[in-house]
Amino acid sequence: MHLLLCGHGYLGQAVSRDFLAAGWKVTAVSRGGTDPAAAPSPALREATADLADDGDIAGLATAIPRPDFIVHCASSGRGGPDAYRAVYRDGCRHLAARFPGIPLLFTSSTSVYAQTDGSTVTEESPAEPERETGRILREAEQLVLAAEGFVFRLSGIYGPHRSVILRKFLAGESRVEEDGRRILNQIHRDDAASAILHAASGGCPPGIYNVCDDHPTSQFECLRELSRRFGRPMPPSAPRDPDRKRGWTHKRVSNAKLRATGWAPAFPSFTTTAATLEH
């Protein structure tokens, strides 16, 4: 079995690790080349291509063995709408066109849910983002669904050496926004990777899936638990940040649909995992 992995960064390296361990061959594609520190493997092939360039993807299709599954988990590099269009919308379009009939999985984001009432959202809930970047993600999702692919809406990714919440807390930069009611939805990097392997292995049919842990928690509860575990004072209160890149939302994301297919997170709760993270 051969995986075409588009994006070999923080999540992509965990994906390639898991697929290689499962006996797959992997072609890992990055715009600027892959990480030289990544562990070498005879089953891992590296390639350079720009997902926004249809010519690059056409060339890739002729240069590598036919893949059995494609994962698009490339990053926009923290760019704005133009980068989102190039990497996500155009990237998905080019992959679907140049590799017809091959299952394509796109890692989208739960930021497409704009709910602010604290309700539980499922894959059937309205996904009507207010930000332009969110609307571009929805365009990419529709392209993938039209190709009978997988849309994995990931919550905030954390893991070894990476957690925005923990980093800000330890740096003394955290603030309790208003009364701290905003719900935080998280997913460990390794759980996201295992969910992707689950899909590629036939564990679930194509469609939309929320990929998050079992215990979304309010910002206040999360910071209170971090304060307890690290023996530090509770951060001060502050107004909500109206300039959040993905908008200010308040919703509890459900992973019930993916869980019903047999997948389960190994790290079911951010607050119980955070204290063990390398940072």
Image (spheres, grey):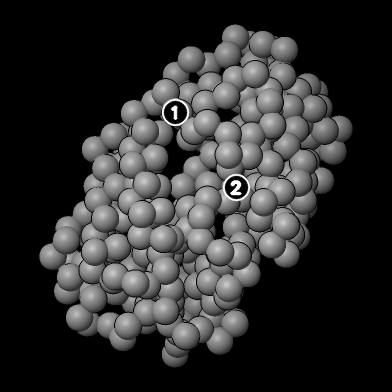
Task: From this view, report whether residue 276 is shown above or below residue 195.
Answer: above
Task: From this view, report whether residue 118 is shown above or below residue 9.
Answer: above
* Residue bearing mark 1: 129
Q: Residues within 10 Å of mark 1 (few under 14, many from 20)?
A: many
Residue drawn 60% across and 57% down?
192
Residue 10 or residue 261, whichever sits in front: 261
Q: Quadrant of residue 124?
A: top right
Task: Tell me where residue 57 appears, x and y as whole percent.
Answer: 21, 67
**Can residue 163 be seen at all in this image of the molecule?**
no
* Residue bearing mark 2: 210
Tell whether 62 sits left or right of 159: left
Q: Quadrant of residue 178?
A: top right
Residue drawn 65% across and 43% down?
186
Residue 19 or residue 122, whichever sits in front: 122
Residue 244 or residue 63, whichever sits in front: 63
Q: Amino acid at mark 2?
A: Asn
